[in-house]
Image: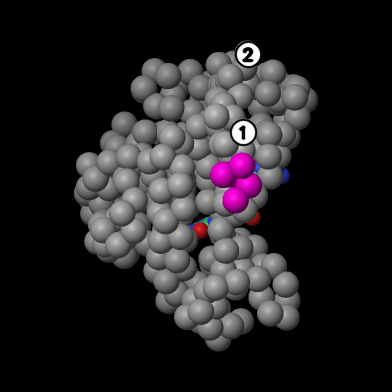
Amino acid sequence: MEADLRAALAQPEGALTLSYQPQINAKGAMTGVEALMRWNHPVRGVISPTVFVPLAENCGLSEAVDRFALKQAFIDSRRWPSIRTAINISATQVQAGDLVGLLQGLLTETGASAKSLEIEITESVLLSDDPETYETLKAVRKMGFTLAIDDFGTGYSSLGYLRRFPIDKIKIDRSFVTHLGMQPESDAIVRAIVEMAEALDLKVLAEGVETRAQVDRLAIVGCGDIQGFYFSRPVEAEAIDRMLARDG
Ligand code: G
Ligand code: G
Ligand code: MN
Ligand code: NA
């Protein structure tokens, strides 16, 4: 598998692709897309990033994988200046790599604008409370990127980092959204996250929204920004072009 991943990274055409999942606001307008990587393995078929991202981390390929996703998303983002393009970054890249150098190089290389790009990091990145991570994220934000915390609520819930780190946005994890309206606890948690985000002047978006009932519940607790199968699955870049053209 490792050799296959090296080969895919050396010749990504057709092997590695990005899908894009729309993010919409309370009015139903598309305000962003999240880039989600796919590996089309010659024998095994489509392999999920939940499999190949950890594999890449274990064999020193994580920078190459992140670089591929960033570069492709930066290039594609130029087609969509009216919305924000979000990209997932592995924890290793934030903590051990030269993320600032990588981003700066790719901005120059692709001509993309940081203002229309969002970097998604997981809570685990922030829990270490490492001064270097802090400086990295501060610099990334100073370059103009938006910083979002992915899968919010699934980490170790040390909320102190929300005060310390320069974050713009929280993405409420799908696990809470899934049980909205079925488990009073989930409604309470989502409501609390939305209120906290407001108090801290953070944007908030709910992930994994699959039903109309969930959309309605989210609207009641004040979370109008959503992403999920209810609106659209991840789709190819050309489908995003068509959706934006249709919306005008
Ligand atoms: O659609 P989905 O199966 O794509 O994504 C599964 C997981 O893989 C998610 O946690 C997502 O954050 C992660 N992921 C998707 N694309 C990328 C990527 O380009 N880079 C990294 N590091 N993680 C990704
Ligand atoms: O961890 P991250 O949020 O980056 O991962 C996004 C993952 O969630 C991707 O695997 C994506 O395909 C998946 N996803 C997006 N919307 C939905 C949804 O509405 N339902 C489910 N079950 N998965 C979703
Ligand atoms: Mn994500
Ligand atoms: Na997530």
Q: Please indicate, yes or no, whether residue 150 appears anywhere in the rendered image.
A: yes
Q: Nearer the viewer, residue 217 or 163?
A: 217
* Structural distance between the alpha carbons of marks 1 and 2: 28 Å
| Disc 1 residue type (three-letter) | Arg
* Mark sitting on residue 246: 1
Judge whether 55 appears above or below 104 on screen.
below
Residue position for label 2: 220
Residue located 57% across and 36% down the image: 245
Q: Residue furthest bottom?
A: 3
* Mark sitting on residue 214: none
Quadrant of the rendered image holding ligand 1: bottom right
Q: Main secondary structure of the magenta part?
A: helix
Q: Position of residue 150 (x, y in %)?
A: 50, 43
Q: Label 1: few (<14), some or many (≥20) within 10 Å?
A: few
First in sequence: mark 1 vs mark 2? 2
Q: Are marks 1 and 2 in contact (CB under 8 Å)?
A: no
Question: Which residues, given as a range, are shown in magenta?
Answer: 238-242
Q: Nearer the viewer, mark 1 or mark 2?
A: 1
Q: Position of residue 40 (x, y in %)?
A: 65, 71
Q: Nearer the viewer, residue 198 or 11?
A: 11
Residue located 73% across and 80% down the image: 43
Residue located 31% across and 54% down the image: 111
- Which quadrant: the N terminus? bottom right
Residue 146 falls left or right of residue 54: left
Q: Position of residue 197 (x, y in %)?
A: 44, 24
Judge whether 99 appears above or below 202 on screen.
below
